[in-house]
Amino acid sequence: MSSIPSDSVLAAAAIASGLVQPNQLDYAYRVAKHRMSQVNMARNQGNTPTGEPSDALLAEILIEQDVLTLYQATQLSSGRTKLTLGPYVITDFVGQGGMGQVFKAVHKVMGRICAVKVLPVHRKTPEALTSFIREIRLQAGLDCPYLVRAFDAGQDGNVHYLVTEFVAGMDLRKLVRKNGALPVSQAASIIMQAALGLDYAHEQGLIHRDVKPGNILVTPDGQAKVSDVGLAGFAQNLLDDPRAGKIVGTADYLSPEQIRSPLDVRTVSDIYSLGCTLYYTVCAKVPFPGGDTQSKLKRHLEETPWHPRKFAPDLPEDFVDIIADMMDKDPQKRIPTAAEVAARLEPWAGSPDAVSVGRLGKSPWLPPPPPSDAEAPVVAEPADDWQARQESSVSRAHNTGATIEASWPQQETDAALSSPALPQVDVVATKPETAAPMSTSMVIGLTLAVALPLAISIGAIIGFLIHRAFF
C-alpha cells in the first residue's frame, strides 16, 4: 500500500467508516499523485516533487470511482466515521420531514435504494416517540401506487428510524418554486393522483391532516405520491391519538374545522387542504399570503382568497370552480370524497409524462450528518413561507378591503367561525402620513415670487424671514 499521509482526515475516516477499502484508497492515492505529476509536467516543472495529495483531490477521485458519494465524502472529510443506520448506508441528505430528518440510503445486502426517516435524538420525548411508532405502524399497512410505501423500521442505538421507498424527483413545492405556476394539465394530473392516494387512505379509515405541496412527491416521469401518511390519525379513533385535540398541519393549508375543532376532523378536511394545494400549484401563491400564523388561521376561518385568475388569467372558469368546491369553508358543501375530486380533475389531466421535473441546483449549505448516540443531529430550520413574504403587498391590499376585478365565490361564514380559541391579535392602526398644511409665510413668499418674476429669489427669502419673525 502506498504511503498515504497520516494527517489525512479523509483517509483515516474513510477506513474507520468501512465505506472505503484500503486497496480503493491506495488506488485513489496513486491516481492523485499521477495527476499532480501531470500538472507539473504541463507547467514545465519536470520532476519537481509533487508533494502529497490534498483530501479534496482524494475525495474527487473516490467520487469519480463511485466509491463514495459527494455527501459521504463531505462528511468523512470533516472527520465523521458513522454513516450507517442499522443495515442501511447513508448516501445523501434529502431534507426535513414532518417528524425528522430524511436521508437517502442503500441496504448493505439487498442493494435497494430507499429513504430513511429518523426521529432526532434530542426530540425523543415519550409523545414524539409514540407518534413516530404510530407512523411506522400506520404506513406499514398501506399499499397504494399513489402513496409512499414503507419497507422497514428499526433502532440503531438511541436512534429510531423508518425506511420507505425512495421517490426520485422533488416535492410539489420545490417544483413550483423552480418552474413557477404549472399549466392546468400538469397541475390536474398531479393533484388527481394525490386525490387517488388520499382516497385509498380514507378507505382505510385514515385522515392525513397535513396535505400540502411539500408532502406530494413528483417523479421525473410525472408520477405523484403522497408522503407522510403516517402522520395521519384514525378517522374513527382520534381519542387514541396522542395529538388529538391539537391543531396538526401547516397554517397555509389547514381547513377551518381543523382550526375550530381539532377533534372534529374528517376526510373532507384533507380535501380542503388539497384544494389549497391545487390553488398554490396553478397560482404559485398560497391562498392567504403574508401575515403570521395566527392571522393565517383567522383568514382561513373568515375570509376568501384572491380569485385564482388574478395570478393565472388563462384558467378556465370550470377548473376554477373545482378549486372553489374543494375549498368551501362549509364541510357540508365541499366536494365530499377524494374519489370525486379525482373524477372531476381527470378531464383536465394530461398524461403523466407531460410533467417536467428537472433538477434543482446544488444547495449552498453543508448537509447535516445522520444522527447517532455520540453526537446531536443538526436539525434544519423549518422552511420559510417564501411566497408569503414576497406577496406581503398583496396581503396588505386584501386586509384593507381592496377590490379585485374577478371575484372569488363568496363564502357564508357562521358567527361561530369568528370565535375559535385563538389568541387575540391586536392590530395597531396608524393614520397615513399626510402633507403638512402650507404655512402663511410660504403663501406670501410664493405670491411675491409670482408677482415679481424677476425677483423670485428675493420673494422666497422675504417669505422665509417673515416665517422666522412671526411663526
Image: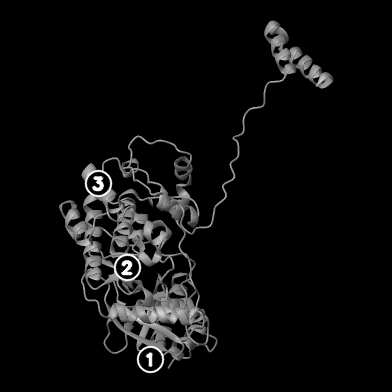
Q: 245 or 450: which is nearer to us?
A: 245
Q: CA distance from mark 3 to mark 2?
A: 24 Å
- Confirm whether residue 37 shows in the render: no
- Give the residue at x 44% y 85%: 159
- Give the residue at x 48% y 51%: 389
The residue indicated by pointer 1 is 23
Q: Is residue 159 left or right of residue 410?
A: right
| Other-residue count near label 3 (Cα within 10 Å), few / some / many at <14 / 14–19 / ≥20 | few
Which of the marked residues, 3 or 2, is nearer the chain's N terminus?
2
Vertical order, 16 against 301 (above or below): below
The residue indicated by pointer 2 is 208
Q: 365 or 3: which is nearer to us?
A: 365
Work out which quarter of the rendered image holds the N terminus and state it: bottom left
- Confirm whether residue 153 shows in the render: yes
Callout 2: SS: loop
Callout 1: SS: helix
Query: Which numbered tag is attached to residue 321?
Result: 3
Q: Position of residue 269 (x, y in %)?
A: 32, 61
Q: Is residue 143 left or right of residue 426?
A: left
- Give the residue at x 44% y 89%: 17
Residue furthest out toward the bottom = 1
- Identify the amino acid type marked 2: His
